[in-house]
Amino acid sequence: MAERGKIVDSEDELDISSIVGVSSIKSTHRDDAKIKQAAEESGFTSREVRKTRSRGRRSPYVEQKAFKVRRGMNDLYIDIGIKLNKADNALFDAAIQALLEKNKLKEELVRLKEILK
């Protein structure tokens, strides 16, 4: 195969501004506030790294327990939580505590109180 001849040397600069008719205008001053305002108005999504929010104190509720219940039990559980103004996990803690106290299971009640500390 025949090799192609070079049209332009790689070391030469090719200036096409005279052909296109555009002069190169370089901005010497960048106004970040105007750029940000124009971006917000146009709906441009920022590519800046988002700052992570601190979550504060970590929840003690880290383990999950999944089990099946009878029909209507979920709704009943939610209604009880609303009436007692307790979150699901706090309601579960209170229910276990009441069950242990009612059945006089002292050892388990001591364990529960250690867990709830």
Image (tube, rainbow, N blue to C red):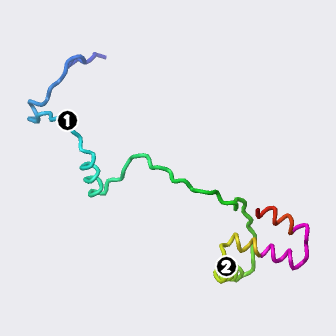
- Which residue position holds label 2? 81
The answer, for residue 7, to whether it is visible in the render is: no
- Who is closer to the viewer here, 20 or 3? 20
Instruction: Give the answer, above or below, for where 44 lies relative to 97.
Output: above
Could you tell me which secondary element the residue under label 1 belongs to? loop
Disc 1 target residue: 28
Q: Which residues are magenta?
A: 95-108
Q: Are marks 2 and 1 in contact (CB under 8 Å)?
A: no
Tell me how far mark 2 sits from mark 1, CA to CA.
63 Å
Q: Residue at 27% x, 49% y: name it.
A: 33
Label 1 CA crowd tier, 10 Å (few <14, some 14–19, many 20+): few
SS category of the residue bearing label 2 = helix
Can you say which quadrant of the picture contains the C terminus?
bottom right
- In the figure, is residue 116 to the left or right of 24? right
Residue type indicated by callout 1: Thr
* Image position of 97 (left or right of 38): right
Give x and y (percent) for residue 27.
Answer: 19, 37
Q: Residue furthest front?
A: 117
Q: Quadrant of residue 3?
A: top left
Res 90 seen here: yes
- Circle nearer the N terminus (2, 1): 1
Q: Residue at x 70, y 60 (%)?
A: 60
**Percent position (x, y) of residue 116?**
76, 64
Residue 58, image quadrant: bottom right
